[in-house]
Amino acid sequence: MSDQPARRADLRIDLGAIRHNVEVLSQRADGARTMVIVKSDGYGHGAPAVARAALSAGADSIGAASLQEALQLRAAGIDAPLLCWLYSRDDDFGPALDAGIELSASSKAVLHRIAGTAAERGVVARVHLKIDTGLCRSGCPADLWPELVEEAAKLRADGQVEVVAVWSHLACADELDHPSIDQQAARFQRAYEQARAVGLDPIRHLANSAAVLTRPDLHFELVRPGIAVYGLDPVPQHGDHGLVPAMTFRSSVALTKRVVAGESVSYGHSWTADRPVNLALVPVGYADGVPRTLSGRMSVWLGGRRRPVVGRVCMDQLVVLCDDDEVAEGDEVVLFGPGDRGEPTAAEWADEIGTIHYEIVTGMYRPRVTRTVVGEAS
């Protein structure tokens, strides 16, 4: 799609920024392959479009959490190597194996389910074995790991699986001096050595976005950047990494009015004008992804400058204070963007309400919010 004027509530996704960020991260990986993570519909940016942009910028493979996400990528024409790792007990591995999707196994039970389905389909399953090194979510506990790798070696010898990788996930990589990082790295090394000891020859992947940017010793053969691909820095305290945010949240002025001193705005009358002022109504609210907790604490970019939002954020609308400036119906309003013009950013929203920018962007794509994609490669 072209870069059209903002609609009522619109996410502008810049694929040029995605490509730039992938190039930056691939350079940081220093020879390791790059798997770009596009779970949660590409962190709210649109998984197929992000995957295509990432691959065109040199990414080697794609990662998605669920079977459904991975199959949707295949249906959208993404034919690069593709890993998924999060399943429910009743999930059917058959369609994924038919589509050449690589699967993760954290237990003997799941490994046997994958191998059994592969045998039924007449294919060899490509499997990544996940070790829990200290995050305590998915991943095989260390005491059960020797049994898992031994079983994987047997299934490989029987021609049912190919063990592609040993992998794990870091808990505190965004806290640069956290002792768990080195502890997890040591546990990961032991797990890798145990896999090698039973005759497996897997690659390794451990580094998320923060580790790509700060821990070259953990890059191994493959890195898995996620949030940084979208231009949101997981370790801003480490310096400027040259990432460009790819999402801009836009709307437009629906109505303007002038009110006199003493008039109050929105539910609860939490803000009252102390002089005559111009107000602009913007038709977005918490149903469109604007946190109600930003009431009285946010600004927008309108008419070439930041302007405060006054009164409470409502379900469908918010009100901007324009002082004596004249703004017009239809004028573009930027709620957050890259920040290069001085507009608010998703990271600023997150900091203001005590969350992370991951939550802001992944929560933005909603049924009545449109998505305008720009910067598609020819």
Image: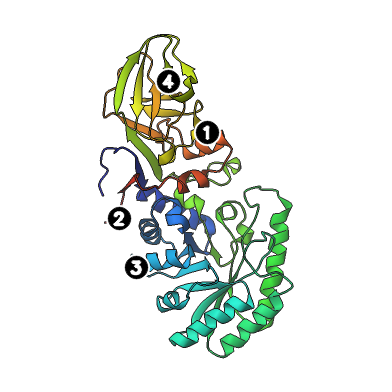
Which is more N-terminal, label 4 or label 3?
3
Tell me what residue is drawn at x 60 percent, y 63 percent: 206
As rendered, which of 20 and 78 lies closer to the eye? 78
Q: Amino acid at mark 2?
A: Ala
Which is more N-terminal, label 1 or label 4?
4
**x%, y% of residue 149?**
65, 79
User: For the residue labelled by badge 4, is the local secondary structure a helix, a strand or a loop?
Assistant: strand
Residue at which label 2 appears: 377
Q: Amino acid at mark 4?
A: Val
Which is more N-terminal, label 1 or label 2?
1
Label 4 crowding class (10 Å Cα cut-off): few <14, some 14-19, many 20+? some
Q: Are marks 1 and 3 in contact (CB under 8 Å)?
A: no
Q: Are marks 2 and 3 in contact (CB under 8 Å)?
A: no
Which of the two discs, 1 and 3, sits closer to the camera?
Answer: 1
Which of the two discs, 4 and 1, sits closer to the camera?
Answer: 4
In the rendered image of this protein, does residue 63 appear above or below residue 195?
above
Judging from the image, the colouring scheme is rainbow
Q: Quadrant of residue 151?
A: bottom right
Most extreme residue toward the front is 268
**x%, y% of residue 140?**
66, 70
Find the distance from the CA under tag 3 to the CA under tag 4: 48 Å
Residue at which label 1 appears: 293
Which is more N-terminal, label 3 or label 2?
3
> Taking the image as drawn, is residue 60 in sight?
no
Q: Are marks 2 and 1 in contact (CB under 8 Å)?
A: no
As rendered, which of 155 and 213 lies closer to the eye? 155
Q: Amino acid at mark 3?
A: Ala
Tell me what residue is drawn at x 43 percent, y 50 percent: 44
> Taking the image as drawn, is residue 85 in sight?
yes
Which of the two discs, 2 and 4, sits closer to the camera?
Answer: 4
